[in-house]
Image (cartoon, rainbow, N blue to C red):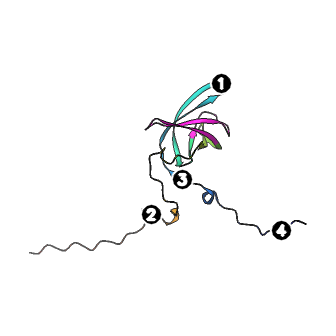
Amino acid sequence: MAEMKAPTPAKSDADRRRSHRVNIAMPVLIRGKKGTQPFEEETQTISVSAHGCMVRVATPLARNQEIAIVNTKTAEELPSTVTFIGQKDNGKTEVGVEFAEPSPLFWRIAFPPEDWDPSERKRSGTPRQAAPPAPKPQR
């Protein structure tokens, strides 16, 4: 008879991530083929990581489709694979893209350290200690 193991709590997607995601809109060019026809589409990222990005595209793409991502600010191009097809809204579909190899420098941004906990970040709406009033001028 098979040995029963206690269920282990499922890790959330964030716990399984290999690198931090940063929500940032960066201009990119998506290149690929639709059948035998090449296509290019200019768009922006929704989020980026060292392993890829999330974008919204009008061009229909398929999971496991090979494409290229071009950082339009640097003209650097990386071979990538579509790993996720999300919701379609206003004619554009949310698409997750993974680089063929991790490339943290592709985005030219600083990623948070590995031990960074986004729940501990300072919020802009957090009340700050008021500065003491300035001394009144002497007469």
Q: Which of marks 2 and 3 precedes in the sequence?
A: 3
Asked whether the beta carbons under mark 3 and mark 4 sit within 8 Å of each other, the answer is no
Mark 4 or 2, nearer chain start: 4
Secondary structure, mark 4, is loop
Tell me which numbered mark, 1 or 3, is placed earlier along the sequence: 3
Q: Quadrant of the N terminus?
A: bottom right
3 or 4: tag closer to the N-terminus? 4
Residue occupying the point 64% across, 60% down: 12
Q: Quadrant of residue 133?
A: bottom left
Q: Residues within 10 Å of mark 2 (few under 14, many from 20)?
A: few
Kindly identify which numbered label has been placed on residue 21.
Answer: 3
Residue located beneath label 4 in the image:
4
| Above or below, 96 relative to 33 | below
Q: Viewer-nearest of labels 3 and 2?
A: 3
Q: Identify residue type, mark 4.
A: Met
The alpha-carbon separation of the residues under discs 3 and 4 comes to 36 Å
**Which stretch is magenta?**
56-82
- Residue 58 among those drawn in magenta: yes
Give the residue at the far top of this rendering.
Answer: 37
CA gap, disc 4 and disc 2: 45 Å
Q: Nearer the viewer, residue 15 or 18?
A: 18
